Image (cartoon, rainbow, N blue to C red):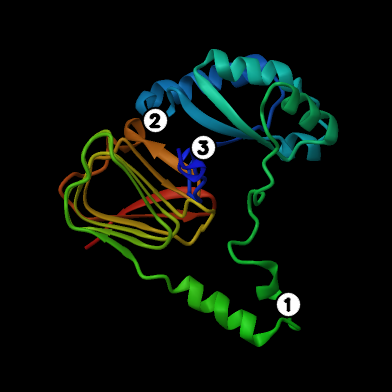
Amino acid sequence: MNQSSILDFRSGTSFAPILILYSNDMEMISQRLQEKIASAPDFFRNSPVLFDLSELNENDMEIDVAALISRLRQLSLFPVGIRGGDPLQEKQALALAVPVDSGRSRGDPILPEIQKRDDAVPEFQAVIRDAVRTPAMMITQPVRSGQRVYAASDLVILAQVSAGAEIMAEGNIHIYNTLRGRALAGVQGDIEARLFCLDLQAELVSIAGIYKTSEDLKEISRKKPVQVYLQDQALIIEELS
């Protein structure tokens, strides 16, 4: 057998909700998690989750990392990373097979820091600007239940998104039909991203990690075009005239 055909590693993009904790009260955390899971069971049940302890540590609030991981697993959530932890918390997480996430912290810029420096090399800045202008991904067929779509730019869909489907984009999402599944725009933290659709019947919509579920969308008029965007850390849904 050709040894090179046994396995392979390929780069890819995955999505996991980030759980940011503002309280170290384990019972309150459990109660709130149960409420969140109940509001969107198809989205949260058996979902990977990355937990962020930066807010707790900034406010000198201790938390038992082992107990937190155990509680998450009891609720059918699967911790896949710790972010914003101190060395001891990271050590505790690693002992329970939860890796340390070295990705960008919440609120960090989308583009490299070099963009903000006056002494940045012009040629490198040009490369960054070109990278931002990645062509939008266009889908002309319906996105069916169970399908997941990820766009590293804007995402344009000319057909309906069925219940149970999930679409994600690092930029804006445009749906020229009915949205019944889950749609997440600005998934890498772009707070300027927007979601547009002609008929909002979604299970969940999200901009840069801030979301609303179907329970929050009951009062939204159907069969009318809307846009979804962030304003002062709140998700705004507005009809388009």
- Sooner in the amino-acid sequence: mark 2 or mark 1: 2
The quadrant of the rendering that contains the C terminus is: bottom left
Q: Residues within 10 Å of mark 3 (few under 14, many from 20)?
A: some
Q: Residue furthest front?
A: 1
Callout 2 touching callout 1 (CB < 8 Å): no
Above or below, 234 relative to 32: below
Q: Nearer the viewer, residue 128 or 32?
A: 128
Q: Secondary structure at mark 3?
A: loop
The location of residue 56, given as percent across then percent down, is 75, 34
Left or right, residue 218 beside residue 184 = left
User: In the image, which disc is placed on residue 52?
Assistant: none
Q: CA distance from mark 2 to mark 1?
A: 40 Å
Q: Nearer the viewer, residue 43 or 223?
A: 43
How far across and how far down the image is residue 42, in percent? 35, 26
Q: Nearer the viewer, residue 40 or 232?
A: 40
Q: Which residue is mark 2?
A: 43
Q: Is residue 143 left or right of residue 54?
A: left
- Please give the residue where the numbered disc 3 appears in the rendered image: 17
Quadrant of image for the N terminus: top left
> Which of the numbered marks, if any, corresponds to residue 117?
1
Residue type at mark 1 is Arg
Residue at 63%, 49% (x, y): give it: 106
Give the amino acid type for the residue marked by disc 3 in the picture. Pro
**Point 48% across, 49% down: residue:** 12
Question: Residue flagged by tag 2: what amino acid is it?
Answer: Phe
**Dot 2 and dot 3 residues touching (CB under 8 Å):** no
Q: Residue furthest bottom?
A: 122
Would residue 20 be visible to someone looking at this image?
Answer: no
Task: Name the secondary structure under disc 2.
Answer: helix
Residue at 80% over, 40% down: 58
Neighbourhood count class around disc 1 (C-alpha, 10 Å): few under 14, some 14–19, many 20 upward: few
